[in-house]
Image (spheres, rainbow, N blue to C red):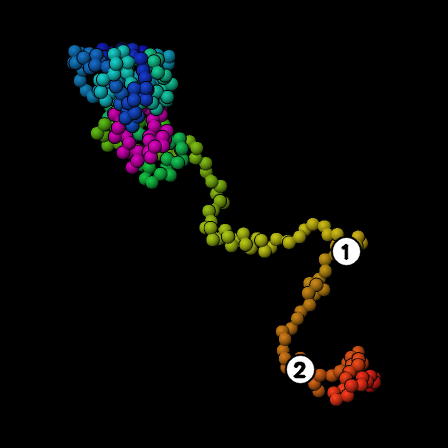
Amino acid sequence: MHRSYRGYHDNLEVFGASTFSKRNLNQGNKILLPASALEQLIRSKQQGPMIFRLQSTQDNNKYTYVGVLEFTAEEGTCVIPDWMLESMGFFDGCQIIISHEKRLERGQLIRIQPHETAFIDLPDPRAILENHLRNFICLTEGETISINFHNINYSIDIVKVEPSNILKAVCINEADIEIDFLKPLDFNDAPPNLVKKSSSLVQQEELQAQKQQTVFTGTGVRIDGKPLNTQMRKPSEDVKTVEPYDPRKQKLKNGLKQTQEAIQFVGSYIKLGNTGTQNKKNA
């Protein structure tokens, strides 16, 4: 869509914040503009917040709205956050169209969708998001912003802004904004019958399963090479019940008896007091 600009409007070369060691820009959506931009705004008596529209020279539908941090960039250039350079498809030194936006409606609601489930797993992600959005002047519907928390970047899509307007953008500076979270892009619904069990319960079930497992399920081979009888024997054939030992039941009547198999001593012996050796006769 063609737009006519009566205020500040220019074509500038864009560079990422890291190129000029301006990494502090990465915490929000404020940019650096040259001093000549401020002079033009003063001469044209531009009023209202310092909000600017960045647009690709290759695609009219690719644009975003930003704030300005300082007018300290080199002439003919502007410096933007690294994440914005990537999400907009820009590259260092490419030409972009930049213009001052006179009026942007104050936001009431934004609907966001994180890319990673890891973001909503953070402690109080809503508070983290609200704290980081203080570095943003405005938000544009359809753009992807980046939130850095503990040196990890989390990508977040701005799905919807309200009130709806032709610019598809709202000012969130000093505004009471309601935030609506959508499911992360990588979120997978767990099966309904999947229940997370405690570690102790899992250990008990694993132990019970081990007890129920068959010790050996292969094929046995006899050492003598004869065919192996694979028929299962009854428990009574394998194991005989042994009663506990009871000394009263095991007591021998009439004392210890000599069995028929027992034999008496038939060796030689020496009688004390006599040097002769005699053989003991069989009983």
Nearest to the observer: residue 112 or residue 148 = 148
Counting from the top left corner in percent of width and height, residue 183 is at 39, 34
Residue 97 horizontal side relative to residue 211, left or right: left
- Mark identifier at residue 100: none
Local SS, label 2: loop
Which residue is at 25% across, 14% downward? 74
Nearest to the observer: residue 255 or residue 125 = 255
- Amino acid under label 2? Lys
The answer to whether residue 162 is above or below residue 33 is below
Which residue is at 78% across, 79% downward? 262
Residue placed furthest toward the bottom: 273
- Magenta-drawn stretch contains 6: no
Which image quadrant is residue 236 in? Answer: bottom right
- Magenta-drawn stretch contains 154: yes
Magenta span:
127-155
The answer to whether residue 48 is above or below residue 262 is above
Q: Residues within 10 Å of mark 2 (few under 14, many from 20)?
A: few
**Sequence order check, earlier mark of 2 and 1:** 1
Nearest to the observer: residue 159 or residue 272 = 272
Local SS, label 1: loop
| In this view, the mark in front (2 or 1) | 2
- Amino acid under label 1? Asn
Which residue is at 21% across, 12% downward? 36
Q: Which residue is mark 2?
A: 251
Residue 184 horizontal side relative to residue 274, left or right: left
Residue 93 horizontal side relative to residue 240, left or right: left
Which residue is at 77% across, 88% downward? 274
Which image quadrant is residue 25 in? Answer: top left
Counting from the top left corner in percent of width and height, residue 212 is at 60, 55
Q: Which residue is mark 1?
A: 229
Residue 248 horizontal side relative to residue 195, left or right: right
Q: Residues within 10 Å of mark 1 (few under 14, many from 20)?
A: few
